[in-house]
Amino acid sequence: MKIHVSVRALRWPILLVAFSLAACATVSAEPDASSWRHVENGEAYEVADRFGSDKLAYKVHWDSFTLDEAEGAAGSVISGTSYLQDCACDLSRRPVVFLFNGGPGASSSPLHFALGPHGRERGAATFPDNSNTILRAADLVFIDPVETGFSRAASADGTSRFLGVDGDVEAVRAYIHNWMTAHDRPGAPVFIVGQSYGGFRLANLLPGLGEMNVRGLVMVSPMLNASAGASDLGNVFALPTMAATAWRFGRSSLNVPSEAEAWEAARQFSETDLLVALQQGALLDPLEKQRLAVEMAGLTGLPVDLVLRSDLRVDVQDFLETLLASDNLLISRLNTAKTDAVKPAPANPDRPAAANDPSLGLGRSNKILAGDIAAYLKDMTGLDQGEDYRSLNLDANFAWDWSGANLELFYADATPRVAAFMNANVDAQLLVFGGYRDLATPLLATRYALTHGGLPQARVDLAMLPSGHSPFDEDALQAPFSDRIFTFIKANEATTAASGGQSQ
């Protein structure tokens, strides 16, 4: 595995709970005209991007696909927004990138406005040109799973079999297959990008993609192996990020010059002394436990008695609420560089603490509604749904069915599915982003999954970044992120051309 540690500072929520692997699902090869809705105004737009001297011409489509809920029942709807280069291109060779975020319950809007031809200024409700768009490399399709964006469950109360591990995979896979058919792109090179829970979704999509020409996979802060996170390994994975956070706020005993080195020093301790101690459980010698508690307290900036009370297994939420408690600050799980100016009472005490994260910006409602995105899509395509776009929907998250047809002895690790796909498709590449400041899907957890799932390491590239859960969250960090993905797609294109065409 190639590991790149960025010295340049390069958003989206995830709520982790127990889950199981999704079973493969079959989908219709041909979209039914009555189930496929296509909206466009036919207008061509232009954007000046960083990847070419000439302006890039493109068109925008919004497509929805009605899913079969059950025999005799109305169907749920899954939808997405597509940006297609307006050119005399050979569409059989023009790559298509499908992108989705996580949650579950998150729309594609974060990736949409990080990599699409427009950015989003929420305070001003404007959508300026995005010079960081990767549209020059490939056509882009941003998918909104059921109950996000303008995708909707059939029932009035929002319940649906597509709000669950298996149903979600079935819905997104059906959308991808039917989009390729409806847009006459069979055989075109395909790339798939999934962030957060979207990484788990991506892994479970792979077995049912059939003969689709998938050339590359991109995972951004992916959730892959939650079983490991629910064991003592979860504490091993979290400690380096806690230590790097404490170092950045001047609360750690580590005497190192950089955040990356603080993370690395804590990783070495975490994977040796701490791992061995946690393995012993109740048999750990009390004196050794005391010694380790003192060292952990120094690394993380936490009180020794808190570490001891936690039995050397410091809860992430306790860390976030305790480290800067003397300053009355709450640290974000999604990006530990962010804090609330003054630690407030929970916006909604009836939901999990993670849902009140400073990076989410939720009020008392469990939904973030975006009227500006609805207006944007109306302007760009003519779509008028008569309601706001659902940027985030935690009600869908809370209703999620985490059971699955393929429980695999309760071990919820999706990584082997990625490995099986890549071992069967010898030209497929995997690019993964992970951030030092992410305590939702800690960087060490990602590295562990990638190195323990049977992946072909020579075709796995892990970019370790000084970022939180979303590398593109801050303006200054967007360019390095888009550069890596743009280069990833173009390098694959060059390799394919050198080999004389597509590989199967």
Image (cartoon, grey):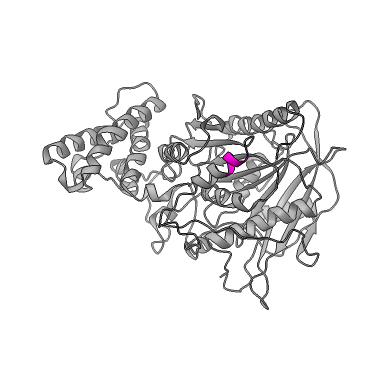
Residue at coordinates 71% horizontally, 51% vertically from top-left? 81
Residue at coordinates 53% horizontally, 57% vertically from top-left? 22
Q: Quadrant of residue 218?
A: top right
Q: Which residue sits furthest top? A: 257
Image coordinates of residue 180 in percent, x first then y, are: 75, 51
Residue at coordinates 16% horizontally, 42% vertically from top-left? 284
Q: Which residue sits furthest bottom? A: 72
Asked if one can make out residue 379 in the rendered structure from this viewpoint, the answer is: no
Asked if one can make out residue 403 in the rendered structure from this viewpoint, the answer is: yes
Question: As rendered, which of 298 and 400 lies closer to the eye?
Answer: 400
Image coordinates of residue 347 in percent, x first then y, are: 43, 58
Image coordinates of residue 489 in percent, x first then y, are: 67, 33
| Location of residue 27 with respect to 186 vertically, above or below | below
**184 on left or right of 147:** right
**448 on left or right of 166:** left
Where is the C terminus found, in terms of image quarters? top right
Dominant secondary-structure state across the stretch colored magenta = helix
In this rendering, the count of numbered labels is: 0
| Location of residue 268 with respect to 396 vertically, above or below | above
Q: Quadrant of residue 389?
A: bottom right
Image coordinates of residue 371 in percent, x first then y, are: 65, 57
Query: Is residue 183 highlighted in magenta?
Result: no
Question: As rendered, which of 336 and 396 lies closer to the eye?
Answer: 396
**377 on left or right of 276:** right
Bounds of the magenta segment: 421-425
Query: Is residue 422 highlighted in magenta?
Result: yes
